[in-house]
């Protein structure tokens, strides 16, 4: 996992943050309050992406 791309889509009081691992093209999304900092949003999305990657590795 050399780099992670983040996409942000704001809808009202919430932001959908998608973390994308470009090598495997696996992505994970979280919806967080718009009041969080960008770093906090990235941490949430990265945690979910790591969870998804671990689950895929177990398959």
Image: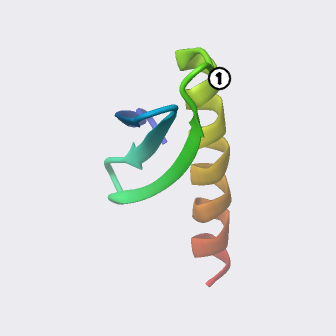
Q: Is residue 26 above or below residue 11?
A: below
| x, y percent for residue 41 | 58, 29
Classify the position of the C terminus by image quarter: bottom right
Q: Residue at x 49, y 55 (%)?
A: 28
Closer to us: 54 or 34? 34
Image check: 13 left or right of 23?
A: right
Depicted 40 relative to depicted 19: above or below: above
Residue occupied by mark 1: 40
Q: How many marks?
A: 1
Look at the image and name its color scheme. Answer: rainbow
Instruction: Look at the numbered disc 1 and give the secondary structure of its residue.
Output: helix
What percent of the width, then of the height, locates residue 17?
Answer: 46, 40
Q: Nearer the viewer, residue 35 or 6?
A: 35
Left or right, 6 with reference to 32: left
> Residue at horizontal 57%, vertical 73%?
56
Residue 44 at what x, y percent from top left?
A: 65, 38
- Most foreground residue, 28 or 1: 28
| Residue found at x 40% / y 48% | 21
Q: Which residue in the rendered view is the most extreme toward the front?
A: 12
* Residue 22 percent coordinates (x, y): 31, 48
How packed mark 1 is, by other alpha carbons closer than 10 Å (few <14, some 14-19, many 20 or more), is few
């Amino acid at each position: 996992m050399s780099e992670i791309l983040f996409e942000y889509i704001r809808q009202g009081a919430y932001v959908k943050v998608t973390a994308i691992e470009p090598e495997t093209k696996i992505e994970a999304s979280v919806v967080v309050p718009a009041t969080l900092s960008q770093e906090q949003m990235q941490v949430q999305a990265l945690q979910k992406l790591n969870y998804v990657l671990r689950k895929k590795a177990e398959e």
